Image (cartoon, rainbow, N blue to C red):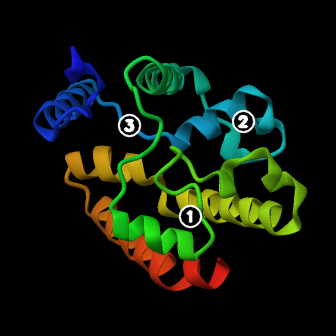
Amino acid sequence: MNWIFEPWPWYVSGPMIAFIMLLLIMVGKNFGMSSNLRTMCTICGAGKNTDFFKFDWKSQKWNLVVVLGAIIGGFIGSHLLTNDFAVNINPETISDLKVLGFNSAGKAYLPTELFDNSVFSNLKGITLLALGGLLVGFGARYAGGCTSGHAISGLSNLQLPSLIAVIGFFIGGLVMIHFLFPLIF
């Protein structure tokens, strides 16, 4: 029964993702999480002020179910199918993060230095969260989708713009972690 608490291997989870993508392609749907924010804003009435939010949100109800499933699946995975709340990180990475002040590295699922409620009590934490959210939101809108939409759905459809976006996401991640992250922390 110990196998339940282990991460699923790529040869199980990969084909499952591929099967879901095949089903979505067959019914003419595109997967992506950032489009759900647009749908939720439209439901809340944002279309009264901005043309971007004027669309038939009911056609996207299926994608809202995906979000609900991701939330429920994440809860089940983290609370019922795991016996360890720490992420298995390379010891060298843990030492590098500790040098940057992340003492919870290797002990917690998320670094408490960034995701604890105390982050709201200092200006640096609030500024980083707000700036990060702004950049992620702008990037997803400018790229026409988020990492999951482009990397999973767009590449499955062999779309060149998605390939370019995914390459950009990886370059941006490398620049962030190797150059900007050490400057911030």
Where residue 113 appears, as percent x and y from the top left, is 68, 57
**Mark 3 lies on residue:** 31
Where residue 59 appears, as percent x and y from the top left, is 51, 23
Query: In this orientation, which residue lies closer to the viewer: 55 or 20?
Result: 20
Query: In this orientation, which residue lies closer to the viewer: 121 or 134?
Result: 121
At 56% from the left edge and 64% from the top edge, which residue is drawn?
A: 139
At 51% from the left edge and 44% from the top edge, which residue is drawn?
A: 109
Question: Residue 132 vs residue 161: left or right?
Answer: right
Most distant residue in the top direction? 1
Q: Secondary structure at mark 3?
A: loop
Query: In this orientation, which residue lies closer to the viewer: 173 or 154?
Result: 173
At 32% from the left edge and 70% from the top edge, which residue is drawn?
A: 167
At 50% from the left edge and 19% from the top edge, which residue is drawn?
A: 72
Q: Secondary structure at mark 1?
A: helix
Q: How many marks?
A: 3
Task: Quadrant for residue 4, please give it.
Answer: top left
**Mark 2 lies on residue:** 41
Query: Which amino acid type is marked by label 3?
Result: Phe
Whole-angstrom CA distance, mark 1 to mark 3, is 17 Å
Whole-angstrom CA distance, mark 2 to mark 3, is 18 Å
155 over 99 or under it: above or below: above
Q: Earlier in the sequence, mark 2 or mark 1?
A: 2
Q: Earlier in the sequence, mark 2 or mark 3?
A: 3
Query: Which amino acid type is marked by label 1?
Result: Gly
**Mark 1 lies on residue:** 139
